[in-house]
Image (cartoon, rainbow, N blue to C red):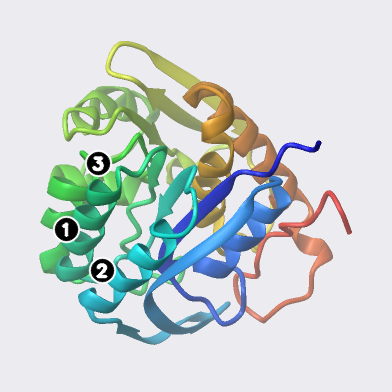
């Protein structure tokens, strides 16, 4: 008898052009061999050029979606993306604690690739205080790390090394501090457990089609996390991301920052 695939849930906002948000998460889970499920927090009008508007759902309806999934399906891992506002952030935390959610990966989405804000200013403290401590892994990029820590440094690899421990004190089991915004021919991410820091480097890929990179990486980690340790999940997720970025120019989607090729291994 074949072993059934893992069931992985994304809690996030939408992307009509399919490159980021829930659509990217579902593609990533599927490409990684997991069964994808989703809870919508916000309906976003965006394309490859930017965010035009979004409507956040009522926290009670987000809770109802989460309960509907957990009351019926074994959930092996959860990825949290765009939460939009404080009410939704606190509701997600409360319902996931209630259901004993495991293998939680938080991508603290605050600003889209276009620079458009996707998180209300009053929600930052809720993300930091209730969602981060709930998480097994958080995956902030450098601007998001600065917001979570309340600092605005000149980011460099040395500064990342100084700050990754401070991020860990916010309460997650692991921190993956992503160095994509730091520049240079090589991108270095720091994976920190509180006791050890692992530096993971990868060559930068010259493409403008990088819409949904953070969503994809965090979703890939969630899809792999129940099958092994955190370091193994992160390494496999980064390998998948490199392939999706490397094949992104094979797609012809939009006039701005196009999507990654989530199914580069298959077509």
In the drawing, what numbered circle is on residue 193?
A: none
- Image quadrant where residue 250 sits: bottom right
Question: Mark 1 or mark 3: which is in front?
Answer: 3
Q: Residue at x 60, y 44 (%)?
A: 6
Read off the residue under disc 1. 124
Q: Is residue 241 left or right of residue 147?
A: right
In the drawing, what numbered circle is on residue 119?
A: 2
Q: Find out whether the residues at labels 1 and 3 contact each other: C-beta distance under 8 Å.
A: no
Q: Is residue 80 left or right of residue 223?
A: left
- Please, is residue 196 above or below residue 223 in the view? above
Residue 193 coordinates in the image, percent (x, y): 33, 20
Q: Find out whether the residues at labels 2 and 1 contact each other: C-beta distance under 8 Å.
A: yes
Quadrant of the snapshot with the N terminus: top right
Pointer 3 local density, CA inside 10 Å: few below 14, some 14–19, many at least 20: many
Q: Residue at x 23, y 81 (%)?
A: 58
Residue 116 coordinates in the image, percent (x, y): 36, 74
Read off the residue under disc 3. 134
Label 1 and label 3: CA atoms lie apart by: 15 Å
Mark found first going from the N terminus, 3 or 2? 2
Which secondary structure lies at badge 3? Answer: loop
Question: Mark 3 or mark 2: which is in front?
Answer: 3
Mark found first going from the N terminus, 2 or 1? 2
Residue 265 coordinates in the image, percent (x, y): 83, 49
Task: Report whether residue 117 is seen.
Answer: no
Which secondary structure lies at badge 2? Answer: loop
Q: Residue at x 31, y 62 (%)?
A: 110
Mark found first going from the N terminus, 1 or 3? 1
- Please, is residue 253 above or below residue 127 in the view? below
């Amino acid at each position: 008898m074949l072993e059934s695939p893992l069931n992985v849930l994304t809690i996030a906002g939408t992307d009509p052009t399919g490159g980021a948000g829930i659509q990217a998460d579902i593609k990533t889970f599927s490409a990684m061999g997991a069964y994808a499920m989703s809870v919508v927090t916000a309906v976003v009008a965006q394309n490859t050029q930017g965010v035009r508007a979004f409507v956040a759902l009522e926290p009670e309806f987000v809770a109802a979606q989460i309960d509907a999934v957990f009351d019926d399906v074994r959930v092996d891992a959860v990825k949290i993306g765009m939460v939009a506002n404080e009410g939704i952030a606190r509701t997600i935390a409360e319902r996931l604690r209630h259901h004993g959610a495991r293998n939680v990966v938080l991508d603290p989405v605050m600003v889209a690739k276009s620079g458009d804000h996707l998180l209300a200013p009053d929600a930052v403290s809720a993300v930091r205080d209730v969602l981060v401590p709930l998480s097994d892994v958080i995956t902030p990029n450098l601007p998001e790390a600065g917001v979570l820590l309340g600092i605005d440094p000149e980011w460099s690899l040395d500064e990342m090394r100084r700050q990754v421990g401070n991020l860990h004190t916010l309460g997650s089991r692991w921190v993956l501090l992503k160095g994509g915004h730091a520049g240079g021919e090589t991108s270095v991410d720091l994976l920190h457990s509180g006791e050890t820091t692992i530096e993971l480097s990868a060559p930068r890929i010259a493409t403008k089609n990088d819409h949904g990179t953070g969503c994809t990486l965090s979703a890939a980690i969630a899809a792999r996390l129940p099958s092994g340790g955190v370091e193994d999940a992160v390494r496999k997720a980064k390998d998948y991301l490199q392939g999706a970025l490397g094949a992104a120019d094979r797609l012809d989607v939009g006039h701005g920052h196009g999507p990654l090729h989530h199914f580069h291994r298959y077509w």
